[in-house]
Image: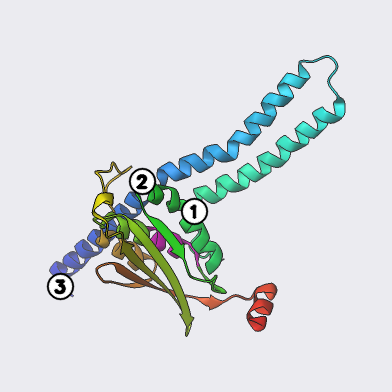
Amino acid sequence: MSSQSSSTAEQVTGLEKSEVEAANYALLRRLAPVIRHNLAGTLQPIAMVAAMLERRLQKADSDPETLLKNTRDIIALSKEAAASCVDLMSWLAPKESRLVSADTGIAECLDMVMTQLSFRGFSVVDNTGGPSVQIPQSALRNVLTAALISLTDAAALPGKVLLGAGFADGILLLRLELKTLDVPEVARVAEKLPYRRLEWHDVQALAQQESVRLTREENRITLLFEASVSTDPQTLVEMVQA
């Protein structure tokens, strides 16, 4: 390969990397309000119990057992909050090798976007049925959430997103289809997004990074994830009994 060809290849690779980083940043900016809200929500119970404990300590006749219970509550809530914060931070710096059951991963992705979508007049109907497979968590978080946001960003009217799933030959298929509300009086008003719109090329960049195949029609997106059947004993029992 000539030096000119090598330089061109490096430029293309650098451009692709920049597009992926831009898409990652745009997605996180869109999710930032939810992450911030969830972080505050995990810490609020600790502050409430701590304030209650402080008031009781100021009383001379405080019951020691009640004080001990409040202290134990703070310890328990702190552990839960720490775990929740670590999980939320993993959206910013995911572990590439971490696998998650599809039903759990889909549920957490929907939880992350549902509030914002509902404010904009959209709803999501989860018809996946909890597929008993495992897929890379970062792939699901990045590509599914970006696809949901991009699909609704491009819609001229609010509507309902139908989410379906299928599994065959080691591939988990997720299908997103937007059914817009064909009613003139509910036409979408101008909205102020927390950051720029997510475009289709953003979803493509994230999918390429996560080795997810995808196709898009006008109001439909199909995602193909490499998956493996769950080896969890309880899940296998449920599959046999189904």
Residue 99 located left or right of residue 222:
right
Asked if one can make out residue 92 in the rendered structure from this viewpoint, the answer is no
Which class describes the residues within 10 Å of circle 3: few (<14), some (14-19), or many (20+)?
Answer: few
Nearer-the-camera pick, 148 or 81: 148
Indicate the quadrant where residue 71 lies: top right
SS under mark 2: helix
Magenta-drawn segment:
136-145
Farthest-out residue, left = 4
Q: Which residue is mark 2?
A: 29
Q: Tell me which residue sits at (13%, 67%) in the image.
A: 4
Could you tell me the amino acid type at mark 1? Answer: Asp
Q: Name the residue tied to disc 3.
A: 2
Which of the two labelled residues, at mark 1 and mark 3, occupies the earlier sequence position? 3
Mark-to-mark CA distance, 2 and 1: 16 Å
144 falls in the magenta region: yes
Mark 2 to mark 3: distance in Å?
41 Å
Q: In this orientation, which residue lies closer to the viewer: 114 or 226?
A: 114
Label 2 or label 3, whichever lies nearer to me, is 2
Of circles 1 and 3, the one toward us is: 1
